[in-house]
Image (cartoon, helix red, strand yellow):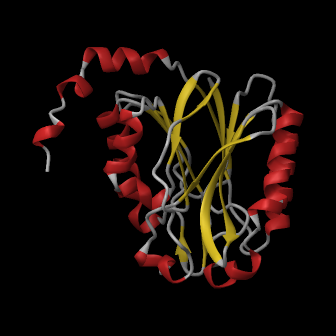
């Protein structure tokens, strides 16, 4: 599977400007062999938390979702659309959107772990639905968002559902970049799956972000890593048969004794 990741800086609080950035990026790419595109967390707004109540989109009439659907059909690619702020029943959620190459929304996930260090709980509501595997091109995939990376339980849940490829869109700060690097590799190794991350560079409201988007294989090998401070496109072709091979050679899941875990 050929995947292109857009390590994108974000114009704070300007959804249309950010959609135009992605529109230009799409036009500049040669997408003939690309199967799937990936964007970062909250890529339409950034972390303009006090403003999200006003600028979050109604998911039933979302210009961003329509934009991604049209792009998926036009370029004939699947899109892991990072996440966007949506407003439902007066609550704002940080929602990941997955769209197939026919323009169908096939999966949505609301970030369940909210970041106390950024005061997210004051502005956002956490998702209440368990993570689930979705499928594109015959590959079982999952998505979690940024801070979720610190919670191995939900990623193990995806692995037990057969997940082979995990996406992590993020706005992870540079002050904790070492955690980003170590935990991303750890999740790949302990769950014997590919991990693809997309983190923004740049800064906003006194926070500098870590970039360092990455492709990591099921052995924990770093196939490719983005820069810390620049916008760029990362591309990698993943051989998903490696997942089954690793799980056969080191049969972690057969060795589990969950009845003894508390």
**Left of 76 or right of it: where is 131?**
left
Identified at 54% across, 65% down, the residue is: 209
Where 207 falls versus 171 (above or below)?
below
Q: Quadrant of the N terminus?
A: top right
What is the count of numbered marks? 0
Q: Position of residue 182 (x, y in %)?
A: 34, 48
Identified at 37% across, 42% down, the residue is: 157
- The residue lying toward the viewer, choosing from 240 and 53, is 53
**Left of 98 or right of it: where is 58?**
right
Q: Position of residue 160 (x, y in %)?
A: 36, 34
Where 114 falls versus 51 (above or below)?
above
Q: Position of residue 138 (x, y in %)?
A: 60, 21
Q: Within the image, what quadrant is residue 14 found in?
A: bottom right
Where 123 falls versus 226 (above or below)?
below
Identified at 66% across, 74% down, the residue is: 89
Q: Within the image, what quadrant is residue 99 found in?
A: top right
């Amino acid at each position: 599977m050929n995947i292109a990741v857009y390590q994108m800086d974000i114009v704070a609080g300007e959804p249309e400007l950010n959609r135009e950035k992605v529109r230009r990026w799409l036009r500049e790419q040669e997408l003939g062999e690309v199967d799937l595109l990936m964007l970062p967390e909250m890529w339409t707004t950034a972390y303009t938390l006090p403003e999200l109540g006003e600028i979050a989109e109604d998911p039933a009439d979302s210009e961003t979702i329509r934009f991604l659907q049209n792009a998926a059909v036009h370029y004939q690619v699947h899109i892991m659309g990072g996440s966007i702020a949506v407003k439902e029943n007066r609550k704002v959620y940080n929602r990941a959107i997955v769209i197939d190459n026919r323009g169908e929304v096939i999966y949505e996930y609301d970030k369940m772990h909210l970041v106390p260090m950024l005061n997210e709980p004051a502005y956002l509501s956490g998702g209440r639905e368990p993570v689930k595997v979705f499928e594109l091109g015959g590959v079982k995939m999952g998505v979690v968002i940024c801070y979720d990376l610190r919670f191995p339980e939900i990623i193990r849940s995806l692995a037990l559902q057969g997940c082979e490829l995990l996406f992590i869109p993020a706005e992870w700060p540079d002050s904790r970049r070492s955690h980003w690097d170590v935990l991303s590799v750890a999740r790949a190794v302990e769950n014997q799956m590919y991990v693809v991350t997309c983190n923004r560079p740049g800064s906003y409201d006194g926070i500098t972000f870590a970039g360092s988007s990455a492709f990591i294989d099921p052995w924990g090998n770093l196939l490719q890593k983005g820069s810390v401070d620049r916008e760029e496109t990362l591309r990698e072709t993943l051989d998903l048969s490696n997942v089954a091979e690793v799980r056969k050679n080191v049969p972690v899941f057969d060795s589990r004794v969950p009845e003894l875990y508390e």
